[in-house]
Amino acid sequence: MLTTHLKVAFRHLTRSKIFTLINVIGLSIGISAFLLIVHYISFQLSYDQFHTNKDYIYRIGLKRYENGELVETSAKTFPGIRMLLKENFPEVRSVTGFYKIPANTGFLFRYQGKIYNETGGWLSSDSAFFAVFPSLLLHGNAATAMKEPNSIAISETIAKKLFGDKDPVGQILDRIDDHSEGGHYTIRGVIKDIPENAHFHATIIEQINDTRPEASVDLWGEGRLMTYVTFSDKIQPDVIEQKLNRLLHQLEKENKLIKDTEVYLQPITDIHLSSHCKDELEANGNKELLYLLGCIGFIILVIAWINYINLETSRFISRTKEFSVRRVIGSGKLNLAVQYLTEYCCLTLGAFTLSVLVIIAFAPYYTDLTGVQLEYISANQSFVWTGAAVLFLIGSVSAGIYPAIFLLKFDPVAALKGNMSKYRSGSKVRQTLVVFQFTVSIILVAFVMTVQQQLDFMKLINKGIELETVVAIRNPTAYSNQELTTKYGEFETFQNKLLQYPAVQSLASSSAIPGSEIGFNYVNLIKRNIGDPYDPAVYKTLFVSADFINTYNIDLIAGNSFEVPSKFNGTAPWETANWSSVILNERAIRQLGFTSASEALNQEIYFEAFDEPLKCRIIGVISDYHHEATKKEVYPTILFHNYATFQQVYFSVRLKEGSRHQQSLSQIESTWRELFPDRPFDYFFLDEYYDRQFRSEVYFQKIFTLFAGIAIIVACLGIVGITLFEMNSRLKEISIRKVLGASVLGVTILLSKTNVRLIAIASILATPLIYILAKEWLSSYPERIQLTAWLALLPVTVIMIIVLIVSGFQTIKTANANPVDHLGGE
C-alpha cells in the first residue's frame, strides 16, 4: 500500500510541476530561514556554556535603592564582599575580584627591543581568578599563576606572536607603564582565546599589585570590582542572597555607602541576556530581539505551511473527478487522506533537501549579516536528527491535515454531478489564513521602517561635534612612565611639524575620542561644597589639550577654552600644570544645581578623587555633545587640561576641506615614523570609527530586514494560492459576465476586490500592534523618532502594491481568457 501511495504521489507531483515547484521553494525558504534563526538564537543562548564549572559560577551584583525604590543595578560590587563570602559561607569554593582596564589604555610592554600595546582586553585580578575560571587556563598552574606580584597570563594569540612554538611560561616582558620605574612582567600562564560566546574577553590578565592604589581601595567605598564566586555544590541563590545581605547590613553603621544597597547572585550563563545594568564588561545581548526573531522564524514556517494549505485546497476542485472515481471503485476516505499526507511528506522531504543546499550556499554571507560564525553541526549529534524528524512530522501533519479533512468529508456522487458548492465554503478558513499573512507582513514592513528610521536618526542627529575629515592617531605609549619623564618634547615637535602642512587645519590630544568610552568615571566625588549629600550621578572626566574643543567644533556656550601652555623649558609638565581650571558640559552644571551656564561660570567645585579635595574653577561651559554614542544618554562631563603630554592617548588631526587625504596621511605617517620609529602608526577616520557604535543596530537591521523580507516573499506565495482558488472556482461566472458584455478591466477589478478587502481587514488588525511594538522597542533609546501615521499607512500601501502585482498577472490572464473554453464543459 505504501508503495502505491508513493507512486501516486510522485506521479501527481511531477504532473503538476509549477505547483510542486512553488510549494517546494516556499517550504525550503521557510525551513532555511527558520533553521538560520534557530542557529542564531542557540548561539546567543550558548554564552558562557564552555566553562566546565558553569553551573557553580555566580556573579555578585549590587542594587541601590532610594526611598525604597530601585534606582541602580550594577555589575560591580564592594571589594569587601569577597571577605564576607570567604568567612561566612562554607559552601564557597573560591571567590575572585577583578576590574577591566579601559579599552583605550592598552597593555604596554617591550620584548626584544620592540614596543607592544595590546588592546584586546586587559584585566587586573586577584590571585583567585583561575580558581574560579579554571577552563580559561591552557598552560600554567591555576593555583599559583596569579600569586606573585607582576605575574601575568597572556592569550594564545599573543603567545604565538611573541614566542612562536616556544613555551611562554616563565618568560620575561619588560614593563614600561606608569606604575613602576622599569621592572618586568613574568608570564605565569597562557589563557585560551576566549570564544565569541563569552560575556567578557581578555588577552592579558595581570595580578593586582597590592602596593598599587587600585588594590588598596576602601573595602566598602566607591572603588568596586567585578566579583565572581564558585560554589562546591548546587545552591539556592535566594538563600545565599538573604544571608549575605543580612551580614552586609550589619556593617552599615561603620560604612555609610552600604546603606540602601543589596547584593544579588546571577548565574554566569544568564549574564549575556540579562536586563541592562551599569558597568557591564561588554555589551549584553538583547533578549527581546531573540523573542522577536524566534516569532518571525515560527511565523515564516507557519506561513509556508499555510501556503501549502491554500495552494492544495485551491487545486482540490481540479482533482474531484480523480477522487470520485477512486471512491467509486472502492477507496476509503481514510485511504485518500493517507494518500494526501503521503504527497505532502514527499514534498516536505524535497523542501528539506533544498533547504540544506540553501543554507550551505548562504553560509559565506551569514557571518557578515549577523556577526556570528555559521558553524556546521555534526550529523553525529542525535539532537540534529531528532529535531529534524520532529520538524518534518509536525510540518507534514500540521499542513497536510486540513486538506485531508476535505477528503474525509468528500461526497463522490455530488462531485460527479458537479455540485461543489459545499467544498467552496472552506474559503472563509483560507481567507482567515491569508488575513493572518497580510497582518504579519504589514507589521514586519512597519518594523523594518522603524528600525531604519531610528538608525538614520541616530547617525544624522546633531551630535554636537563635527567628525568629518578628522583623523585619529592612537599613541601606544600614552601611559608609560618613560614618556612622562623624557618624551613629552617629541610630541610637541610632532604637533609643530604637523601644523606646518597645508592640509592640516588643527591638532588636539585627549584621553579619549568621540566614539570611545571615557574611562574615568566618578560617583559622589564631584561636589559644589565639601560635605554635600550623596550624588548618584556618574561624572565622566576627559583630559584634553587646548585645541580639543576647536578641533571638534564643540559649541562653547560660556567662558573660554583652555590656554595653550607656554614652553616648559625642560620642566616636567605636571610640575607647572594648573589643575584648578575645568570646563563642564551643560548636563554637569545642571547636575551640580546651577540654573544656567552664565551662573556656573567662575564658580568653584570640589573634585574629591584624590587624598585632598581639589578646588576647581569653572572657566567654560560646552554643549551636551554625544561623546560615546547617540544611543546613550549624555553624561555629566568634566574637561581637564592635559598640559602637553598627560593623558595623550589619542591625537586628533583635522584636515582641511578639499585636501587630499591619502597624501596628507602619507605626510603624517612619515613624520610619526621619523619621531617614533619604535611605535606603530595606528590611525583611523573618526566618522567611520564613531559609526561602529551602531554595529548592534546595523546587525539587527540587516537580520530583521532579511527575515522580514523572506516572510513577505513566502506570504506572496499564499497570495498566489488564494488567487488561483478564486480563479478556478469562478471560471464559469467570469465567462458568463464576459459573454454578457463585461470588460476585462471590470472583471479584473471584481476579482481583485477580495484581496483588497482582506488587506483592509489586516491593516485594521495590524495598526494597534504596530504602535505598541514600535513604542516598546524605541523606549530603550534616550533620543528617538516620533511615531506618525505614515508608519501604518506606508506598509499597507507597500503590501497592497505587492499583492496587486503578484495576483494581478493571474487575474488579468483569467479575465482575458476565451469564455468558450469554460462554458462548454461539466
Image: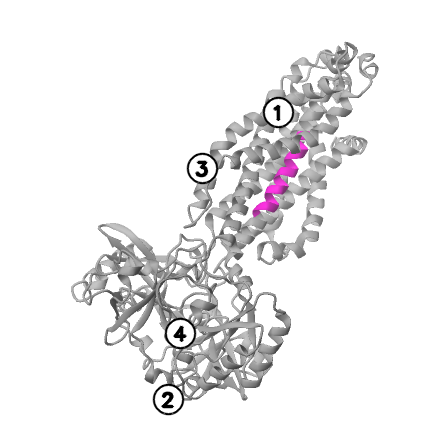
Give the quadrant of the N terminus.
top right
Q: CA distance from mark 3 to mark 4?
A: 45 Å
Q: Secondary structure at mark 4?
A: strand
Label 1 or label 2, whichever comes before in sequence order: 2
**Which mark is nearer the camera, 4 or 1?**
1
Q: From the image, tell me which residue sits under label 1.
A: 756
Q: From the image, tell me which residue sits under label 4.
A: 124
> Mark 1 Cα within 10 Å, few/some/many (few <14, many 20+)?
some
Q: Residue 637 location in percent, x, y?
A: 35, 64
Label 2 or label 4, whichever comes before in sequence order: 4
Q: Which mark is residue 796?
A: none
Q: Secondary structure at mark 3?
A: helix
Instruction: State the extent of the magenta-drawn residues as a range.
Output: 704-720
Corner quadrant of residue 618: bottom left
Q: Nearer the viewer, residue 260 or 509?
A: 509
Q: CA distance from mark 1 to mark 2?
A: 81 Å
**Residue at image point 58% right, 65% down:** 657
Contact? badges 3 and 2 (CB < 8 Å): no
**Which mark is nearer the camera, 1 or 2?**
2
Residue type at tag 2? Thr
Q: Residue furthest bottom?
A: 570
Q: CA distance from mark 4 to mark 1?
A: 64 Å
| Residue 367 covered by magenta stretch | no
